[in-house]
Amino acid sequence: MNALIQEKHLLIRRKMRQFAEEIIKPVIDDFDEKEIFPVELVREMGKTGVLGMTAPIEFGGQGSDYLSYIIAIEEVARVDSSMAATLAAHNSLGLGPIIEFGTTHQKQSMIPAFCTGEKLWAFGLTEENAGSDAQGVETTAHISDNEFVINGSKKYITNGTSGISAGMTILAITGQSDGRKEMTAILVEKERVGFIRETMKNKLVWRAADNGILYFNDCRVPLGNQLGERGKGFKIMLKTLDSGRLSIAAIGLGLAQGAFEMAKTYAKQRRQFGKSLSEFQIIAFKLADMAMKIENARNTLYNACWLKDNGQPFAQQAAMAKLYCSEIAREVADEALQILGGAGLFKNREWPIERFYRDQRLLQIGEGTSEILRIVISRNILKD
């Protein structure tokens, strides 16, 4: 039990644990193996309300606090990371910027459909030469006949290409200011001419998630699709990533919890030398270390969420939470696989640690690599 947990948090945990166990778990291995994005499963998830958890009630959302949303991701990730990633990217990266920076018209016309599972929305920052170096964005948008004309591409974009993906918010160069790139956030619907979407396959991780490459060839959108102020796109992106890092941390925490529980159950059942693995001190100590790391990761993440929910600065704590939870996911998944031994080296529906072991690898890369986050944290602690 965490000191920050209230009854509403326990309710969302129970609700999403039941959904993940009863709806996601029985079918997700098939989607992972065939590398198929499960549209109907996402729509079922939408019926729980979690696809609009942080959206205001007046726009069809749940108006939840951020910690409730993070717990929802954690519980989904405890069973599967692909569905957790779909949930996280849609809320934090898709809905988040529109909720915070959108006009009233943009919110009214877009958000309600995003809260039901009917449509998903993506956020496009990463390019071939832009990722950790966010200033390296090369996609451009110039104005012609009262429209933005966009040229460039985005890569590795979650929720960008499926049948229920309605479009994405992109970061594009719209000019120069004092010798620097002027970057603006722009909403691009999938129906726009010149917007080409390509689903990425042969992935190591998140095989049941929708990740894609997006191309813009003289893609024209109205000037009214500008999100926030012109030239403020980079700041919008940075603020979006701060919140997004909490959701990636939640995926790491949930994955670690699921891997730990799997290893504990296996260790109690598997017998060697006349007794269960859990009766061997070396295995019991592994499980103890895993439990301790997960507890510390949960406290770190929930504290960062509390800061955000209470209007306090949280960027440094978000970076710490994302870094720590992703590292713990790696360590716990590795030790869980060690405990399962040969049973964990193959695709195994009863003991799917192979999927967990693969999926954790993205967490040290996406939304700020571990190396970049250490730079962010070190700069913050050395400012004073």
Image (tube, grey):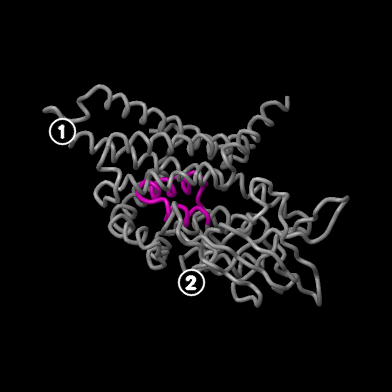
Which of the marked residues, 2 or 1, is nearer the chain's N terminus?
Answer: 2
Q: Can you identify the residue that label 2 sits on?
A: 163
Element under disc 1: strand
Q: Nearer the viewer, residue 127 or 220?
A: 127
Dividing the picture into quarters, in which one does residue 82 lie?
Answer: bottom left
Q: What's the amino acid at mark 2?
A: Gly
| The N terminus sits in image quarter | top left
- Asked whether, in this view, residue 17 is left or right of residue 128, the answer is left
Element under disc 2: loop
- Spot the residue most to the left: 274
- Asked whether, in this view, residue 340 is left or right of residue 310, the answer is left
Q: Can you identify the residue that label 1 sits on?
A: 271
* Residue 312 spot, x, y in % from top left: 63, 37
**Magenta segment:** 64-89
Question: Residue at the location (23% across, 38% down)?
Answer: 266
| The C terminus sits in image quarter | top right
